[in-house]
Image (tube, helix red, strand yellow):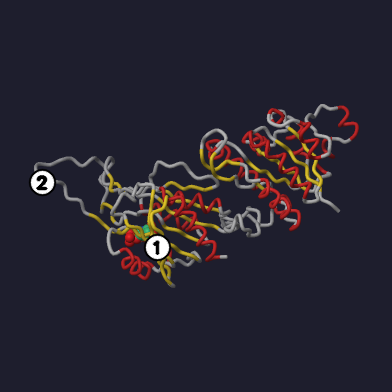
Amino acid sequence: MSKHILLIIGGGIAAYKSSELIRLIRKSGMTVRCVLTESGAQFVTPMTLAALSENEVHTTLWSLKDEAEMGHIQLSREADLVVVCPATANLLAKMAGGIADDLATTLLLATDTPVMAVPAMNVRMWTHAATQRNIKQLAEDGILVMQPDEGAMACGEFGPGRLPEPEAILAEITRHLENGTGAASLVGENELGSNPLDGQPAFAPDAHRPLRGKHVLITAGPTHEPIDPVRYIANRSSGRQGFAIAAAAAEAGAQVTLIAGPVHLTTPAGVMRVDVETAREMEKAVHEALPADVAIMVAAVADWRADSQSGQKIKKKGAAPAPLKLTENPDILAGLAQHQQRPGLLIGFAAETEKIAEHAKAKLAKKGCDWIVANDVSGDVMGGTDNSVHIMTRSGSEIWEKLPKPEVARRLVAKISEEIS
Ligand code: C5P
């Protein structure tokens, strides 16, 4: 029997793409009935949707005719899948909070059918802590939330938040209907415990999200090692490369934990961030985040810290400078290589100013990791926007000439996906 989709269209510029989605759904042999929110009707008309779906379009809770013919609860229950597309920040917030103040949100609260939300919004709205909180809640509630695409947006900004292409949305719909892996049916498959993947829907790997179901642990940025209440030892790391890798891994469907030293960067969408200051705090956070399938240690961890931290600001005393005694910090990467819960794929970064390949090879052996991504930091790589890297693995090496850091990140994530798939 042909499957039936209830499509709820929220109010965003991406609503125009729902027309194409309806066309594709019907072309694939399924039927579709549309519910248009009040704000959605500012972008597409009920007439367009009715013509494309060849079904009546529902817009209000207060239609006596609809209630007489088909109650609004029935509307949601006769579907095999409810698809909210575009799911605006407002709709997601209402869904996460269980608010039912119009036809769309009432149906969403009343349905016992699996629900899939396809978010689309401005990048800042998507990365806002409130939206990310809501997404997490919805995933916990068993709603399948598609990752938005990244790119230029209608509002002129750039980043994650774009509605995925209708073909990709249809592929996701079909996959869930065929595999019977509607998100709601997956709730409770994992019992809550210490595994960071617990409570996440068990997704099957696919071409768009090759790291789906994998936990990727990343460190990024510098560490600050206090000397006294106002001074610290630091380095020029901006955290950009590590954050770009976290973004690329999340985009590839991974569950990402990003342990960040002090940096001025916004958290990439869908990434769980833990802020730390010192190497020892970073080491503790890394261990607490285990187990992980992949760990990528991008942070420029300070090799040394002050042997003792003065409780008061150190004062100048006469002509001689105050002595600064240093002690070595733990090597987080080498420690992880020896850890009982060593991630299956352990990757280190190496900032070098000379003999890059030679030093990278030596570091691979010394640290006990699987790959070393070495970069020449003699130029403006630290804190800059580009990077050129040597990837040293146990079976060989490759060189990626100067590339923007997000591109290095995407290629690295593609290489990781290939390795662990
Ligand atoms: O020895 P070096 O600092 O060049 O090694 C760099 C690699 O080791 C990076 O992956 C970095 O994150 C990691 N590292 C670490 N803990 C340290 C020093 C470096 O995890 N104390």
Query: Mark 2 or mark 1, which is nearer the start of the sequence?
Result: 2
Q: Position of residue 155 (x, y in %)?
A: 55, 33
Task: Name the residue that disc number 1 marks.
Answer: 399
Residue located 78% across and 42% down the image: 6
Residue 305 falls left or right of residue 204? left
**Residue type, mark 2 in image:** Ala
Residue 320 is tagged as 2
Whether residue 238 is visible: yes
Q: Is mark 1 within 8 Å of ligand 1?
A: no
- Nearer to the camera, 165 or 115: 165
The foreground one among 329 and 66 is: 66
User: Is residue 330 in sight in this rendering?
Assistant: no
Quadrant assignment for the C terminus: bottom right
Find ligand 1 in the image and state its quadrant: bottom left
Secondary structure of the residue carrying numbered label 1: strand
Give residue 208's position: percent from left, percent from top.
Answer: 61, 55
Query: Which image quarter: residue 325?
Result: bottom left
Q: Is residue 122 left or right of residue 36?
A: left
Residue at the location (37% across, 71% down)? 365
* Residue 351, position as x, y percentages in the image: 33, 57
Q: Disc 1, disc 2: CB below 8 Å?
A: no
The mark closer to the camera, 1 or 2, is 1
Residue drawn where x is 38% and y is 62% of the image:
390
